[in-house]
Image: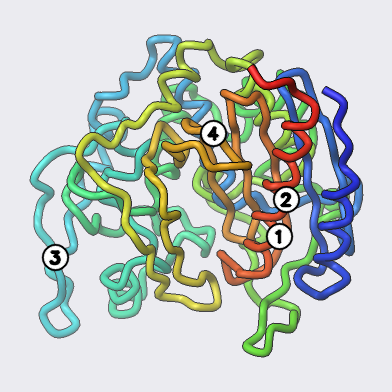
Amino acid sequence: MSFNGSAIQALLDGAVSKGAVHGIAAVVVGRSGPLFHHAAGEAGERTIFRNASMTKAVATTAALQLVEKGQLSLDATVESILPEFGRLQVLDGFDGDQPRLRPPSSKATVRQLMTHTAGLGYFFFNEKLMRYHQVTGEPNPLSGLKRSLSVPLVNDPGTAWEYGVSTDWLGLIVEKLSGQTLGSYLTQNVYGPLGMNDSTFAPSAEQRGRLLRVVQRQGDGKLAPSNVDLPPSSEWDAAGHGSYGTVQDYGRFIQAWLNDGAGILGASTVEMALQSHLGQIRLPELIQSTVPTLSNNVPAMPVPQSWGLGFHLTLADLPGMRSTGTGDWAGLFNSYYWIDRSKGIGAVLMTQLLPFFDMPVIETLMGFESAVYQQVGATVPAA
């Protein structure tokens, strides 16, 4: 596939020159390797990014490897592997400042962790949880303290899709079953085999020196230094948000998923993971932010969608853009990726800017995706 990236390059350079971003990097990959890479502004060839929630797909891949090996069942209860999960109760509300808790009506499963239907939430997207942290003083997951994972559920398992710390618990399952930290397991079974040599939960001083700084979009649209960052160290390898790496590293991960899991998973597992696993549960029309400095409200795309094992799924062909069955997700610092197996194309666009779902970045992302598919259309004969 001959790929002319000049339009994409101009788009990214333009996003920097008009002040939409301070630094941005992108990679486009096909099944056999990278097709395009460009970095602009403060981002360079070897810039390291906080992957934030883009960590989730990689950690889920680790868990899927254990499923393939017969060491883990998707329908096992979480507490059968991690007894401490069985102590979590559901937060029903508050009596004054007293949290009202009750036992969950069913036991969460490994599959529900992968689909965000296990009942767990995030404080910055859930009013009840936000209030819980305020009245109890319990730490939140961005504190680096492991006990932040032991806050109550916000729903009964299997009743609703709610974005939260599910993947962190999934990472603890990988650690328990493998007898390794998540970072060392991934180095051996995902990062190493795929050549993701800059991917880590504990960046070295040299890697920290290559980290793109975080900026904050101000009310007037300008960018200023942000005082929000991931903790310099964490008590656990946070499968939900804790990894770092280059845009090229993440491109190698996406290439493996495009290429039937080559090097890390079997083709049938890839196929299974990118099917809808939500059953009757519907994704919310709007994810409402409770912390405007961290995230804007996130509206659902006005197209059929669902959730697979570790990925958001688009269930329709978008004209001039991704195909039905495409898996995707994003990271808090406005980084995005998609994996379109039917067209054999995937891409990553990364910056380090808050709050999440920043409109100037989203506009850049839409332009980027359109430009990618224009190129793909120009280079691949119609079937």
- CA separation in Å, label 2 and label 4: 15 Å
Q: Quadrant of residue 130?
A: bottom left
Residue designated by label 2: 368
Q: Mark 1 touching mark 4, by CB under 8 A? A: no
Q: Quadrant of residue 54?
A: top right
Please state which of residues 329 and 117 is positioned toward the viewer in this rendering. 329
Of the numbered discs 1 and 4, the one sitting upstream in the chain is 4
Check disc 3 and give the amino acid type: Asp
Which residue is drawn at the image coordinates 45% and 41% (left, top)? Answer: 312
- Confirm whether residue 378 shows in the render: yes
Element under label 4? Answer: loop
Residue designated by label 3: 92
Mark 1 or 3: in front is 1
Q: Mark 1 touching mark 2, by CB under 8 A? A: yes
- CA separation in Å, label 1 and label 4: 19 Å
- CA separation in Å, label 1 and label 3: 40 Å
Which residue is drawn at the image coordinates 33% and 57% (left, top)? Answer: 121
Residue designated by label 1: 364
Residue designated by label 4: 323
* 6 to the left or right of 366: right
- CA separation in Å, label 4 and label 3: 40 Å
